[in-house]
Amino acid sequence: MPKPIRKAIFPVAGLGTRFLPATKASPKEMLNVVDKPLIQYAAEEAIASGVTELIFVTGRSKRSIEDHFDKSYELEEELEAKNKTDLLTIVRQVKPSHVNCVYVRQPEALGLGHAVSCAKSLIGDEPFAVILADDLLDNNPPVLSQMISLYQHYQSSVVAVEVIAPEQSSSYGVVSGRVFDQGLTKMDGIVEKPAPKDAPSNLGVVGRYIFTPEIFTHIHKLKPGSGGEYQLTDAIQTLLKDQLVLAYEYEGVRYDCGNKLGYLKATINFALKHPELKDAFKGYLEKRKKFIE
């Protein structure tokens, strides 16, 4: 029986330069999509998938993430005193009582591989998930839950992928391999941001991973690449020599909130599903349509 996935790493030390000046003093992970920050959507996906320990790899100017998941005694007391029970419930649901949040610093921005390795002592010998909050994935069941089911069945590391256009390859890690099962590829290689002519397939990696703890050994052996960074992609490439790694074409919709257009698409589509806003917002968009046309 494989060990359960109880822990998830959230690398949140990045500077978010694409969203300046909004991210000058506030983390990009705290950008709101309607009424929740990106990091909360990511945390909710993990919690709904059975994760009970959220490990945030932070950097400077990320204190607001810690504050967001911390208990706010003053706010809760005020809401309770004013009998605003609905809002009180929302505040308390940010971090359910059975979930533990842990924070570790990444002292330098040395790449995703390095960020994951910062949490090694907190993971121990357990399998774990890595979630990049930039990728907002919308589905029921959650994408991470789908991947955990695969891990439990095959007892192997799993990397989420989606079909990409050839011209997009230079923005993704691109995998190669052979068909293993429906929606699954047995990986034999992975290349970070190849030129379209060099891309080994049309499957690009998105920000969801499940790893066995052996990945840390491979990260530790990495040599720094461009900019002195330690790439997680390179560690996955060497992990392939030791164990099965599956690329999974997940079920769901992805919004790349690492760029402004993807963020705006997420905001519109989540607003159109919001129970309080959807009807009024849809009406507003219909009125605006004539100006766009």
Image (cartoon, rainbow, N blue to C red):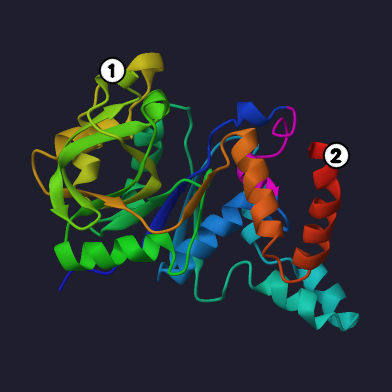
Q: Secondary structure at mark 1?
A: helix
Q: How many marks?
A: 2
* Dot 2 amino acid type: Phe
Q: CA distance from mark 2 to mark 1?
A: 40 Å
User: What are the residue bounds of the magenta stretch?
Assistant: 21-32
Residue 239 visible, this angle: yes
The image quarter in which residue 228 lies: top left
What residue would you read off at disc 2?
291
What percent of the width, then of the height, locates residue 65? 63, 50
What residue would you read off at disc 1?
197
The image quarter in which residue 111 lies: top left
Q: Residue at x 47, y 68 (%)?
A: 140
Along the line of sight, which residue is nearer the eye, 138 or 219? 138
The image quarter in which residue 49 lies: bottom left
What percent of the width, then of the height, locates residue 256? 53, 41
Q: Quadrant of the C terminus?
A: top right
Is label 2 in contact with label 1 (beta carbons under 8 Å)?
no
Q: Secondary structure at mark 2?
A: helix
Q: Residues within 10 Å of mark 1 (few under 14, many from 20)?
A: few
Q: Residue at x 16, y 34 (%)?
A: 238
What percent of the width, then of the height, locates residue 29? 61, 45
